[in-house]
Image (cartoon, rainbow, N blue to C red):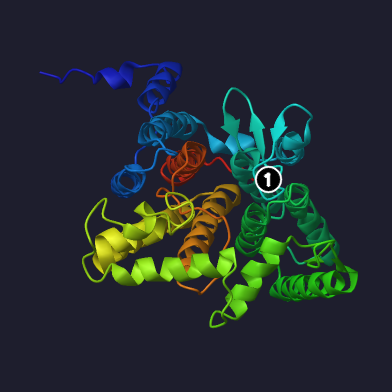
Amino acid sequence: MASLPQIDSLATPDKAVARSTKKRRFPALNLPFLVIVTLLVSYGLVVVWSAVSNDPDYSFSRQALGVAAGIVVMAAIWRLDYRRLAGMTRIFLIVNVVLILSPHIPGLGTDAGMGAQSWIRLGMQLQPGEFAKITVILLDASVMARYGGKLDNPLEYCKALGIMLVPFLCIMTQPDLGTGLVYLFIAAVALIAGGARLKYLLVTLGLFVAAIVAVFAIDELLKYRTADGSWEYRLLKQYQRNRLLVFMNQNSADMSDEGYNLQQAMIAIGSGGLFGKGLMQSSQGTLGYLPEAPTDFIFCVLAEELGFVGAMALLILYAALIIVCIRIARSCGDLFGMVIVMCVVGMWMFQILENIGMDIGLMPITGIPLPFVSYGSSFMVVNFALLGLIGSVWSHGAASGKKDGYAATH
């Protein structure tokens, strides 16, 4: 007896396509990626819970709410086909300018302290420069995707670099040097991953160093004495100069806020020993020796309470996340998606290096938070959004992009 034909073989091409699309209604998942993210976020919540338990200025429930909102945002972006965003350079540029400059709008912006106009009030305080990290990454990736992996024309390089510098120039009007450095590092990663010539990159680095030296030299020439006899500088804030001076001369007897903060951070890390003092036992954080312990100096709290073992566990989770993300980037079927993932990875690596490095004296003290660990619901939502972007690249560019034959750079 002849075998009955398979049902699939009777389907019309249109029905087959519809059924195939229905099967892909939910994007492909990357299990190692999700497991590592779950462990890292859970670990961060435990550390934050311990750090804010005795501090009325912080709320753990708000941090947990940020994680919940972040998961929703991540899922929504994961479903989105990132390839539809390619070629939207002008839109991303406009969005970045409007978003970053919004704190200057009268009645909307609010002072974040130390003279920085970085926040807006919309029922709750938000930091637009933080959310702009997402659009900065998309802007830089869309710029580099236009060159197909090879940027060797000097005029085109200058054009691409100029576009990428716009968000940095906007954020410096607040001024927010820490976020500005993040933008610059994202741009550097985009240029390297996008195929910019090494010679141009080295020249840019040299000009950047020369610009820093020039700023200090000009500041010295333009400084003036105030009524109380102290020196006032025109280009750099006094606390910014202090941070750099403390970094360059850590053995001095400087007892400014920045020098004091570094000393207390190193005491907290050193006192943790091998296994730490235990959760909620951070004397440096609980007694107020560490300023902004749940945010800028959260790694010190972790090291004091959980010791060297706890700190290494965090670094292992970070390393695992970076390795998985780099594999996703390498397997991506188009340049746009690859640059997106590498920019996110580069940004996280810079933030990890800067935040932990400043606690042990290897980097200047800045207000750059630690990804997935530092307190801040807005910061957590942004990081989850970036996870969603990486998930979208995996689902549409790595897991299925080669099958579809769809190139975002076309």
Residue 272 horizontal/vertical position (percent): 28, 67
Residue 264, quarter of picture? bottom left
Residue 396 vertical placement versus 143 (above, below): above
Q: Is residue 351 visible?
A: yes
Considering every residue shown, the one lying at the far front of the view is: 228
User: Relative to residue 263, is residue 271 drawn left or right?
Assistant: left
Residue 198 horizontal/vertical position (percent): 69, 74
328 and 149: which one is in front? 328
Q: Is residue 323 visible?
A: no
User: Relative to residue 163, is residue 82 drawn left or right?
Assistant: left
Considering every residue shown, the one lying at the far left of the view is: 1
Secondary structure beneath label 1: helix
User: Relative to residue 364, is residue 16 drawn left or right?
Assistant: left
Q: Residues within 10 Å of mark 1 (few under 14, many from 20)?
A: many
114 and 153: which one is in front? 114
Instruction: Give me the residue at 32% from left, 16% from top.
Output: 10
69 and 256: which one is in front? 256
| Total residue callouts | 1
Residue 334 horizontal/vertical position (percent): 56, 49
Instruction: Give me the residue at 73% from left, 41% from top.
Output: 89
Residue 40 vertical placement versus 211 (above, below): above
Amino acid on which disc 1 is placed = Leu
Quarter of the picture containing the C terminus is top right
Residue 128 horizontal/vertical position (percent): 64, 38
Question: Which residue position is annotated with label 1?
Answer: 139
Instruction: Give me the residue at 57% from left, 27% from top.
Output: 124
Quarter of the picture containing the N terminus is top left
Residue 239, quarter of picture? bottom right
